[in-house]
Image (cartoon, helix red, strand yellow):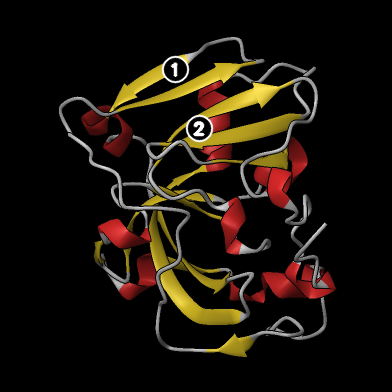
Amino acid sequence: MSVTDVTDVTDLYRKFGEERLPPGQRETSAFPVLSKGTVPDWDPDEWEFTVTGAVEEELSLSWEEFRELPTRTQRQDFHCVTGWSRFDCEFTGVSFPDLADRARVRDDAVHVMFSALDGYTTNLPLEACTREEVLFTWELDGKPLPREHGGPLRVVTPHKYAYKGAKWVDGIEFLTEPERGFWEKRGYSNTADPWNEERYG
């Protein structure tokens, strides 16, 4: 993929704050590994991605089928709630809006719950998900996403702290009432806006 195929969305911070680096963050070129537990096993032949809940058409996609969906590459910034940010990450994958369109989300859907192979969950209001920058990604900087960083598939949410982007994601459920995910139930912010430093509830 050539450089011209990469969409730069690193200026999205202008919608949320005055500085590209959110308050309380430090920029790093490293990519620290933080997870709630160990890296889960996965079998590409058995892996399944599901879209359920308040949709007109529930989806069940194999790894091969998921990879055949329309793909885009974006240059994004990545903000961890523990205080570091990595600029100019190039992620390749499927946008949330593209996937939502395929499932034909119902009008009564207001919230989204992401699930993962390790049992992790995280939630966001639907309006926070329906941005082109929210990607289900399998590639980082032109290489397969490392397992410790959520490979084969993770969510990236550059307008939120990264715990809102589930590693090893294997499904989403559209909800008609808000629910809280793993860290949100344990005192982390439900909104997770880096530019307001919404780290903990």
Query: How many numbered circles does the render carry?
Result: 2
Quarter of the image where the C terminus is located: bottom right
The residue under the point 31% across, 61% down is: 148
Kindly identify the residue that appears in the image at 40 percent across and 77 percent down.
31
The residue at which mark 1 appears reads as 59
Residue 190 % position (x, y): 77, 50
Instruction: Name the spot of residue 140 as percent of width and height, x first.
Output: 33, 65
Near mark 1 (Cα within 10 A), the count class, few <14, some 14-19 or many ≥20, is some
Give coordinates of residue 183: x percent, y percent. 64, 49
On the question of residue 154 being in view, the answer is: yes
Q: Hey, what amino acid is under mark 1?
A: Leu
Give the residue number, with chain letter if any, for mark 2. 99
- On residue 11, the disc is none
Crowding around mark 2 (Cα neighbors within 10 Å: few <14, some 14 to 19, many 20+) is: some
Residue type at mark 2?
Answer: Leu
Residue ID at (77%, 84%): 23
Q: Looking at the image, which is closer to me, 79 or 2?
A: 79
Helix, strand or loop under label 2: helix
Q: Nearer the viewer, residue 93 or 23?
A: 23
* Labels 1 & 2 near each other (Cβ < 8 A): yes
